[in-house]
Image (cartoon, rainbow, N blue to C red):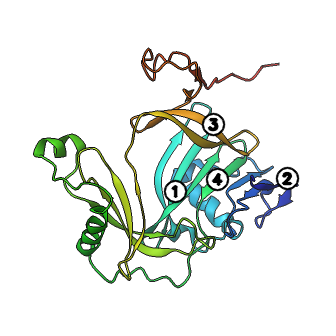
Amino acid sequence: MGSFRHSTAATSANADYRIMSIDYDPKSSSPTPIYVRLTSDKPNAFVAPAKGVEGNYMDILEAQHCLLHIEKPKDEFRLIATETDDLGITHVKLQQIYEGVPLQGSQLFLHYTASSELVINGRYQATPQNISTLPYFTPETATNTALAHLAQQTVLRPLSDFERQILQYDQPDCQLVLSHLPDDPQQIPVLAYQLTIRPNFLERWVYFINAHNGAVLYHYNHTCSDGPSSATVTDLNGQPRNIPTYQVGSTYYMIDGSRPMFNGGMSDLPDNPVGAICASILTIPPLIT
């Protein structure tokens, strides 16, 4: 089942903007939308050059905080990256935080131009309520808990100095996050230590340890391997689509190598695939009449 859409235009809380479309995830009880498209008749409604990128996106979030179910946007989002592409579209990537602690898997993306159209997409949470961000034990204790559990899943082998240099890894990375159980429909945030561990030269594991009671919330093997994969993207109508991709290292290319005609042995990926279906992005200038 896909997300449902309100296709009828409506006026937002700010009378300068109109909501052209808004999508929610029907599998989640979260009130936050995953896709919003706004337009305005006001010139440069979303762009104030004198304020710069940071000033613009904060103004946007403040103006739409009721629609987005965010109480204090300036305190709840941290800028990760910005980019303005060749078409003049500014893309802003934001990480959601609560009392300085990042919410795992909660990021917001803004896309806007001087033509007074704005798209907001991503997955995040309504402002958390009454959650303690004070851990009850140290990162060292969380690391020991994760390593003891991981020893039951795979082989723990100390890395040589050469292997550490290649992997750029010295010890498990550990940081506080607000996470939730993957199968929790309420998506109630829990304070946790997120650890990235390399138990040996080949594998890479991720653990989430409850920072209040020390329980293993969940874990998974995050070892990367090249080969056919998939990705979920948003099409021009704002609908999520699953597309085939091909993973090379940590990069996913728009190459379909899942068909029987694909010849991996003769392919030089990603530049020269044999028997694969490749997708390209064509930038076509508008017709001048």
Depth order, front residue of 95/225: 225
Quote the CA–CA distance across marks 3 and 4: 18 Å
Q: Position of residue 187 (x, y in %)?
A: 58, 71
* Label 4 or label 1, whichever comes before in sequence order: 1
Type of amino acid at the residue the image marks with label 3? Ile
Q: Between residues 89 and 31, which one lies in front from this camera angle?
A: 31
How many other residues sit within 10 Å of disc 3, few (<14), some (14-19) or many (≥20)? few
Name the residue that disc number 4 marks: 121
Residue visible at 62% across and 62% down? 61
Q: Pick out the residue farthest to the front.
A: 152
Residue bearing mark 3: 243
**Tag 2 secondary structure:** loop
- Which residue is the site of mark 1? 94
Q: Earlier in the sequence, mark 2 or mark 3?
A: 2
Q: Amino acid at mark 2?
A: Ser
Q: Is residue 99 visible?
A: no
Amino acid at dot 4: Asn
Nearest-to-viewer mark from 1 and 2: 2
The residue at which mark 2 appears reads as 7
Disc 4 versus disc 2: distance between alpha carbons?
16 Å
Mark 4–mark 1 distance (CA, rounded to whole Å)? 11 Å
Whether residue 102 can be seen here? yes
